[in-house]
């Protein structure tokens, strides 16, 4: 049977109130008399007085209507009257003060929350031993606030997380390997407000605010969970708030920042700073900010170390009703303040900061703006260089007008990929918070993406891991802890961390700024290499924003030779007969990107080359007026026209194609007039299509279509099917949005096939997401949406309708839409 930790308490007795009555009664012969629906007071009982506030209180034993004895408490407003009494069944046991914590016992040995036969009260805690890797604890603990890091990774690869079990206890858990579960490391019985962790080689450094007046620290052994040293950093404060800590990975120097009030500045929270070279002796606390006015103050510090090793603190500032901002303080010869964002009258809170491998400072926070003054959204901003003096324009990542997004935590890995996690009610039907992520892998921010969905209860307070040594990279989600307070209760871990080395790549050709003419080639050559063992490596290439393609695949520790020849023709790039791009624009730069990815998702640098194109222009074709028009009733007639080529190519060829017959050449030469006869026998009854096409030396084509009708058949059509090929501007698309305006009573079936070129069509019947009436009476508009998991380039829309008889003449008035 599983073992759990139990906490042992004394037992106290408490009265249980069964009913309460208000009124007056007389006291006769020193005993109360009070009639009510449940019984009466009698003088046969005994009672005693004891103090309750400013009035005496009496307790008496009396008999109720059913003959049972019950305890009553009542108050006297005078010597002879009672204004209130409470019917109490008796005293019942309740939890008292803590006697012993972390008693290990089999599940069920003691009550989960109640009195045991030994006379003590027990409360069951978390399971002993590792839980599943995704669960840190199954207890209703919380990640106190997001002032500092709550999750760290030690030099030996172990993870440590800290949560708060109550207002008087922080609990630390450890995960020994990447695949093992979490186990209890240490319980800190501290009446704490906030806590932050930092890795100290293979031990844990912990800073916390507690008792409303002290900032303290602890160094913990991860082998035993014992306290190696601890003490105060600053005492005698009048109030304490959030804390943050960062340790310089090159020197081991510890930097701490915290929000506090002091007797010298009792009206405002300010940021204070201290440092230590050994984690035991601390510098005198420095005032970073100096506000002291009601309604003003600085809070929520997030400390980082710049590339020069000097600290920078990001915090939230309020200075009067019209100044709400995100403030930075950087330590030069003195603390220098820079307001990087001001929200005016709109509050800005909970900043989280990180420094990437190049020294750029990145900040996220939760704030309000003029366009959403009552809702918190997530903002992002970064420094323009490693000094932290100038900053980009802030970017609002979320755009909600009615859903709060709060408690953002930012991190970055060794490849400078940025991640921001926060909790929010992302979608309109949601009633529970989700943990949501934005990520930036070197270009635009991608998201929001739900990474912990609140399907049954809230998922809140994410805190991400930051490795100041930049020893690894994150994959899809950075290591993160978050709480689940309302369903599947506990604290959870998600994400991954890889110490894998990324492959390297060299591109020897093409050179930069190559110009491609019709049928020219662009040759990709070079090599790639991955030093890690037992991995596979895939090299990709990409033209502009088109879908990436595989260039080469091989195992690691093997020199991978790169070789690919692409051909420019008809305004596009081809790999053999496979089209890689849409039509490329002349006169603008196009990009070729080449990179390598290993089987652990380690990615090399991306090599870019720029090239230009001069497309071949299509030949020109004109068709003379066709006689007869309308119904064909002659045996033979001529179709004529001219052909030419604006690029003065040596030769053009003109062909005709009647209905589904094979094309027949009707002209071959440098360009000029052409003609051919059409006989009645070539045409079918009904609609006929004649396609005239001219092709130049390089395959560029121009065509004209002639439609003729022969002896129109009057038999009504009761079932009709129309097919449309959708060609996205980008060449492929993941989603199709359709709007169909039709007569309201029309029987309509809409099907869509989205496949890759060459694949068999696979139709899905679409169901209208919405049907709305149009301004014209009797006409409605259906809205359809369909999305695949990856872009497709062979998109066919099929619409069919059936009418009961020829008298019904329903119509489709308009088909429109968009692709993405």
Image (cartoon, grey):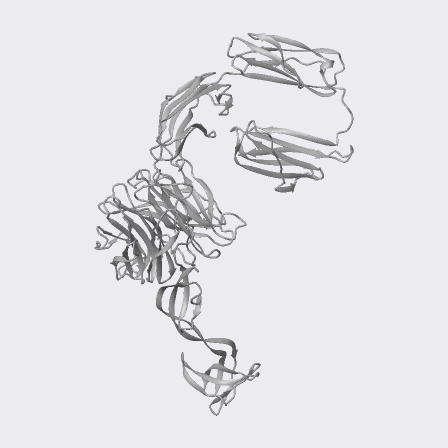
Circle count = 0
Rendered location of residue 405, percent (x, y)? 45, 49
Rendered location of residue 543, percent (x, y)? 44, 26
Residue 447 placement, left or right of 178? right
Residue that sits furthest to the bottom in the current view: 29
Quarter of the image containing the N terminus? Answer: bottom left
Residue 154 placement, left or right of 455? left
Q: Is residue 185 above or below residue 776?
A: below
Rendered location of residue 282, percent (x, y)? 22, 54
Pick the front one: 365 or 752: 752
Q: Is residue 309 above or below residue 645?
A: below
Residue 138 placement, left or right of 738? left
Q: Is residue 793 above or below residue 80?
A: above
Pick the front one: 611 or 721: 721
Task: Mark yes or no: residue 316 visible.
Answer: no
Q: Quadrant of residue 219?
A: bottom left
Rendered location of residue 355, percent (x, y)? 32, 42
Task: Mark yes or no: residue 296 visible.
Answer: yes
Pick the front one: 557 or 162: 557
Residue that sits furthest to the front in the current view: 1
């Amino acid at each position: 049977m599983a073992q759990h930790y139990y906490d042992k308490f004394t037992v106290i007795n408490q009265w249980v109130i069964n009913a309460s009555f208000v009124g007056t009664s007389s006291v006769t012969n020193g005993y109360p008399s009070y009639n009510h629906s449940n019984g009466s007071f009698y003088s046969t009982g005994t009672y005693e007085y004891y103090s309750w506030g400013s009035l005496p209180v009496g307790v008496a034993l009396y008999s109720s209507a059913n003959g049972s004895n019950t305890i009553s408490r009542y108050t006297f407003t005078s010597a002879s009257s009672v204004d209130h009494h409470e019917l109490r069944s008796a005293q019942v046991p309740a939890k008292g003060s803590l006697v012993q914590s972390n008693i290990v016992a089999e599940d069920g040995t003691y009550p989960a929350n109640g009195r045991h036969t030994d006379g003590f009260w027990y409360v069951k805690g978390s399971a002993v031993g590792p839980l599943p890797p995704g669960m840190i604890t199954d207890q209703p603990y919380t990640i106190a606030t997001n002032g500092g890091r709550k999750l760290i990774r030690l030099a030996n690869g172990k993870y440590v997380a800290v949560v708060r079990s109550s207002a008087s206890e922080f609990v630390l858990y450890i995960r020994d390997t990447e695949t093992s579960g979490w186990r209890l490391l240490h319980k800190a019985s501290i009446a704490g407000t906030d806590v932050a962790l930092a890795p100290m080689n293979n031990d844990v450094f912990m800073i916390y605010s507690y008792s409303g007046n002290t900032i303290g620290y602890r160094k913990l052994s991860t082998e035993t969970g014992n306290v190696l040293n601890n003490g105060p950093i600053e005492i005698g404060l009048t109030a304490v708030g959030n804390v943050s800590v960062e340790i310089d990975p090159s020197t081991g120097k510890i930097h701490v920042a915290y929000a506090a009030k002091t007797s010298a500045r009792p009206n405002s929270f300010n940021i204070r700073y201290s440092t230590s070279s050994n984690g035991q002796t601390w510098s005198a606390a420095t005032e970073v900010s100096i506000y002291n006015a009601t309604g003003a103050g600085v809070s929520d510090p997030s400390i980082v170390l710049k590339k020069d090793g000097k600290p920078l603190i990001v915090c939230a500032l309020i200075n009067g009703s019209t100044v709400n901002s995100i403030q930075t303080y950087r330590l030069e010869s003195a603390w220098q303040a820079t307001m990087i964002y001001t929200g005016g009258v709109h509050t800005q809170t909970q900043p989280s900061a990180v420094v990437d491998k190049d020294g750029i400072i990145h900040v996220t926070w939760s704030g309000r703006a003029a366009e959403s003054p009552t809702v918190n959204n997530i903002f992002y901003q970064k420094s323009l260089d490693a000094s932290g003096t100038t900053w980009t324009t802030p970017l609002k990542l979320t755009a909600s007008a009615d859903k709060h997004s709060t408690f953002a935590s930012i991190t970055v890995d060794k490849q400078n990929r940025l991640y921001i996690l926060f909790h929010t009610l992302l979608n309109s039907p949601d009633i529970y918070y989700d943990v949501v992520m934005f990520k930036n892998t070197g270009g635009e921010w991608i998201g929001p993406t739900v990474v912990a969905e609140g399907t049954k209860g809230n998922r809140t307070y994410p805190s991400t891991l930051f490795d100041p040594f930049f020893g690894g990279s994150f994959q899809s989600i950075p290591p993160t802890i978050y709480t689940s307070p309302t369903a599947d209760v506990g604290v959870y871990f998600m994400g991954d961390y890889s110490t894998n080395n990324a492959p390297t790549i060299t591109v020897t050709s093409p050179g930069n700024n190559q110009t491609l003419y019709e049928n020219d080639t662009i040759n990709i050559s070079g090599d790639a290499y991955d030093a890690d063992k037992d991995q596979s490596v895939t090299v990709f290439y990409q033209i502009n924003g088109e879908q990436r393609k595989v260039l080469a695949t091989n195992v690691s520790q093997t020199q991978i030779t790169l070789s690919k020849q692409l051909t420019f023709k008809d305004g596009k790039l081809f790999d053999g007969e496979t089209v890689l791009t849409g039509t490329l624009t002349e006169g603008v730069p196009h990009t070729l990107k080449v990179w390598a990815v290993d089987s652990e998702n380690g990615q090399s640098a991306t090599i870019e080359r720029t090239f230009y194109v001069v497309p071949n222009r299509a030949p020109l074709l004109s068709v003379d007026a066709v006689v007869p028009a309308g119904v064909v009733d002659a045996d033979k007639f001529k179709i004529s026209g001219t052909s030419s080529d604006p690029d003065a190519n040596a030769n053009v060829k003109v062909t005709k194609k009647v209905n589904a017959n094979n094309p027949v050449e009707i002209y071959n030469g440098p360009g000029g007039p052409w003609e051919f006869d059409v006989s009645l026998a070539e045409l079918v009854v009904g609609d006929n299509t004649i396609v005239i096409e001219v092709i130049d030396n390089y395959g560029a084509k121009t065509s004209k279509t002639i439609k003729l009708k022969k002896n129109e058949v009057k038999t009504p059509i009761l079932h009709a099917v129309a097919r449309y090929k959708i060609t996205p501007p980008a060449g492929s698309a993941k989603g199709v949005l359709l709007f169909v305006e039709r007569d309201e009573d029309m029987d309509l079936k809409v099907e869509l096939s989205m496949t890759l070129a060459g694949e068999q069509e696979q139709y899905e019947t679409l169901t209208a997401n919405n049907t709305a009436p149009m301004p014209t009476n009797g006409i409605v508009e259906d809205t359809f949406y369909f999305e695949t998991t990856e872009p497709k380039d062979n998109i066919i829309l099929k619409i069919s309708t059936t009418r009961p008889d020829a008298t019904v003449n329903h119509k489709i008035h308009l088909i429109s839409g968009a692709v993405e």
